[in-house]
Image: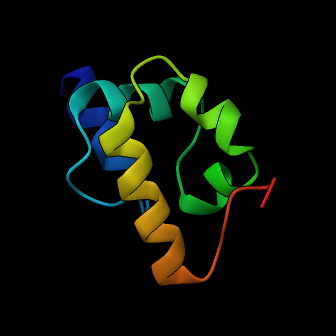
Amino acid sequence: MNQDTAAKNTLNDIPSGLSKPAIRALSNAGLQSLADIANMSEAEFRKLHGIGPKAVDLIVAAFEANGIAFADR
């Protein structure tokens, strides 16, 4: 199993459609769920290498669908 496949298999409720760099960024940061990401500020999340505007949009949409938000909101 390659690193991308391993990372994708460990992400619990992360929305599909994220790029491979974004998936690696989450995995490398130890972020395996929306709840993990919600413990960060949006600014911290945006600073992760591999997280771009599309990833932010997908995560924010998933947050809204699940009634959660970044720690600073």
Residue 69: % across, % down? 67, 66
Residue at x 20%, y 52% (from the top left corner): 17
Inspect this view and state whether residue 10 appears: yes
Colour mapping used in the image? rainbow
Residue 22 location, quadrant: top left
List the single residue furthest toward the right: 72
Residue at x 81%, y 53% (from the top left corner): 72
Q: Relative to 27, is 71 on the left or the right?
A: right
Inspect this view and state whether residue 11 appears: no
Residue at x 66%, y 44% (from the top left corner): 42
- Which quadrant: the N terminus? top left
Q: Relative to 22, is 60 on the left or the right?
A: right
Residue at x 19%, y 22% (from the top left corner): 2
Residue 33: % across, % down? 54, 57
Q: Relative to 41, is 9 on the left or the right?
A: left
Q: Is residue 38 above or below residue 43?
A: below
Residue 45 location, quadrant: top right
Residue 50: % across, % down? 39, 21
Q: Relative to 54, is 67 on the left or the right?
A: right
Q: Is residue 53 above or below residue 4?
A: below
Q: Is residue 10 above or below residue 20?
A: below
